[in-house]
Image (cartoon, rainbow, N blue to C red):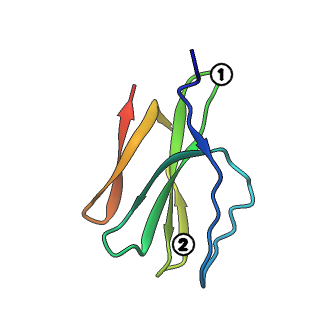
Amino acid sequence: MGSPYQLCSVQIEGPWVPDLTAEPVWSNVYGRSPDSTVVALVQWDIVRNDPGFRVVTLDSVKRTVQTSGRLVGICESLMWVGAHFIPFVKG
């Protein structure tokens, strides 16, 4: 049986490249706002083999990086609702 955790590398290019030097382990799940100015990445946060994640939101207009608190489960997708992302979680 394989691991349920999908991993990927993240490379950001453009006029603003945020400092993400902590080298977190990224999931292959991401989302974009309709105008593509806000991108969300999913960062694994596994504690004692208990799956969890954080949503890291990059706003290229405001040039900000925001990281959510730890969410329990496995993020299957992100959906843009209003002005933020909602994660769909597999428990």
- Identify residue for label 1: 48
What residue type is disc 2 on?
A: Thr
Residue depicted at x 64% and y 75%: 17
The residue tagged with tag 1: helix, strand or loop?
A: loop
Image position, residue 7 (x, y; %): 61, 41
**Can you say whether 20 is above or below 15 in the image?**
above
Q: How many marks?
A: 2
Residue 75 placement: quadrant: top left
Identify the disc placed on residue 32: none
**Can you say whether 83 is above or below 78 in the image?**
below
Residue depicted at x 64% and y 71%: 18
Q: Marks 1 and 2, how far apart in space?
A: 31 Å
Residue 85 placement: quadrant: bottom left
Specify which label sits upstream in the sequence, 1 or 2: 1
Image position, residue 72 (x, y; %): 47, 31
Q: Residue furthest left?
A: 82
Asked if residue 86 lies left or right of residue 16, the reply is left
- Identify residue for label 2: 64
- The foreground one among 64 and 80 is 80
The quadrant in which the N terminus is found is top right
Image position, residue 44 (x, y; %): 59, 40
Residue depicted at x 55% and y 66%: 65
Q: Specify few, some or many for label 1: CA neighbours under 10 Å numbering under 14, 14-19, or 20 or more.
A: few
**Can you say whether 49 is above or below 22 in the image?**
above
Image position, residue 14 (x, y; %): 60, 80
What residue type is disc 1 on?
A: Arg
